[in-house]
């Protein structure tokens, strides 16, 4: 089976874990500090704070930005639930804004429609590995004095206007989950250029304690620390990330070249000023395609090819959020995309033969 995603683990990662185990320093320690320094340098930010998941990074980022009871935060309904849950975890209100068909990211025009006097922040999501329209969203944030927390969980190494993901806005959250472009099994990072945001997030991940004054608790906090075992893997992956991303980009180019011109398929579009790092290679299967999307998935599976739908239902249609008054039809573009998107294998482990099999199989059913 050609899997839709696959962790790339080599001897270096294994040796790095063994070295940490032998050192006896397993929890947050020198490897975490080294990762933070190197990750900040890579992203071009003053600070990088390591946490135990991308969700924790979003939670810590929102806390550090001062989000609290009844504060409204605007985000996309077309994303994984972790983009929205931390807002609720801090007592805030999730406000959705529809997305663009061009890049699956939040639509700046729709964002501005949702702003009220209770709006405090925007969480734009770099979906599938492509950065949101930063210029337009930043202009809106500045106009209304809103905080900007980039959900960069899928976009490590992505670029817009010669700037890397993670350095847009007030802060950015990354995920290092097992299937991400850079991974350590479970893990997250928060990047920022703001000293106060960085300090507040560091306290938040460690029970409200400052690293300078242990056992003095400044505020509520969580056990969101990263282990040195995870950091050791992430350090090796960070050294490889540009090569891993290049392989994904090359694979995406080959898929596009092989699938272009097929009636009923809409392929990814990349603006000239963007580097899309293809956490997912996501096409749209429209009604003009010969068979339905679901039938195509079944057919690909028979050919031992994996494919996935990310995401089959927008967040506002789940009971978790519909109870706040959301209903079908509220965000028509997100709902349309949920019925069309299909992610194909694009990970660095693919061979040219496997890419050809994917292309040939889809052409056969077209």
Image (spheres, rainbow, N blue to C red):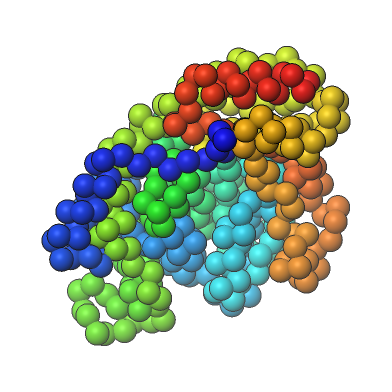
Asked if one can make out residue 193 in the rendered structure from this viewpoint, the answer is no
Q: Is residue 324 left or right of residue 39?
A: right
Left or right: residue 316 versus residue 5 is right
Residue depicted at x 35% and y 36%: 241
Quarter of the figure that contains the N terminus: top right
- In the image, residue 359 sits, relative to residue 165, either above or below, namely above
Q: Which residue is at the far bottom?
A: 216
What residue do we see at 20% from left, 54% from top?
Answer: 18
Vertical arrangement, residue 46 with respect to residue 158, above or below: below
> Which residue is more in the foreground, 77 or 184?
184
**Residue drawn at the location 52% of the way across and 40% of the way down:** 5
* Quadrant assignment, res 10: top left
Locate residue 300 relative to residue 13 in the image: left or right: right
Residue 174: x %, y % from top left: 44, 51
Residue 282: percent from left, percent from top: 64, 34
Residue 139 in picture, x, y percent from top left: 57, 44
Task: List x then y, in percent, for residue 90.
Answer: 54, 74
Q: Quadrant of residue 173?
A: bottom left
- Residue at left offset 37%, top offset 74%: 223
- Asked whether the viewer can see residue 219, the reply is yes
Q: Is residue 61 left or right of residue 136?
A: left
Give the number of callouts: 0
Q: Quadrant of the C terminus?
A: top right
| Foreground of the two, 360 or 189 | 360
Res 72 → quadrant: bottom right
């Amino acid at each position: 089976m050609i899997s839709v995603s696959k962790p790339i683990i080599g001897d270096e990662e294994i040796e790095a874990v063994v070295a940490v185990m032998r050192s006896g320093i397993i929890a947050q320690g020198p490897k975490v500090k080294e990762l933070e320094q190197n990750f900040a340098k890579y992203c071009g930010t003053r600070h990088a704070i390591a946490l135990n998941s991308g969700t924790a990074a979003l939670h810590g980022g929102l806390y550090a930005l001062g989000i609290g009871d009844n504060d409204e935060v605007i985000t996309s309904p077309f994303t994984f639930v972790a983009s929205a849950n931390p807002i609720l975890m801090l007592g805030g209100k999730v406000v959705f804004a529809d997305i663009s068909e061009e890049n699956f990211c939040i639509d700046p025009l729709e964002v501005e429609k949702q702003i009220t006097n209770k709006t405090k922040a925007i969480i734009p999501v770099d979906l599938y590995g492509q950065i949101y329209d930063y210029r337009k969203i930043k202009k809106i944030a500045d106009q209304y004095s809103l905080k900007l927390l980039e959900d960069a969980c899928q976009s490590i190494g992505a670029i817009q206007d010669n700037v890397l993901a993670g350095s847009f806005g007030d802060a950015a959250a990354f995920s290092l989950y097992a299937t991400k472009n850079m991974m350590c099994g479970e893990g997250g990072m928060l990047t920022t250029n703001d000293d106060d945001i960085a300090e507040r997030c560091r306290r938040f991940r460690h029970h409200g304690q400052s690293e300078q004054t242990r056992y003095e608790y400044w505020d509520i906090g969580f056990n969101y620390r990263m282990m040195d075992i995870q950091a050791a893997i992430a350090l090796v992956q960070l050294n490889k990330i540009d090569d891993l991303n290049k392989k994904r980009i090359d694979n995406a180019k080959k898929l596009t070249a092989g699938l272009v011109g097929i009636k009923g398929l809409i392929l990814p579009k990349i603006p000239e000023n963007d580097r899309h790092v293809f956490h997912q290679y996501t096409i749209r299967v429209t009604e003009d395609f010969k068979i339905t999307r679901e039938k195509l998935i079944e057919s690909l599976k028979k050919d031992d090819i994996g494919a996935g739908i990310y995401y089959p239902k927008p967040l506002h249609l789940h009971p978790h959020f519909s109870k706040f008054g959301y209903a079908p039809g509220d965000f028509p573009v997100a709902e349309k995309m949920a019925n069309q998107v299909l992610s194909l294998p694009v990970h660095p482990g693919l061979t040219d033969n496997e890419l050809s099999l994917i292309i040939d199989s889809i052409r056969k059913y077209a």
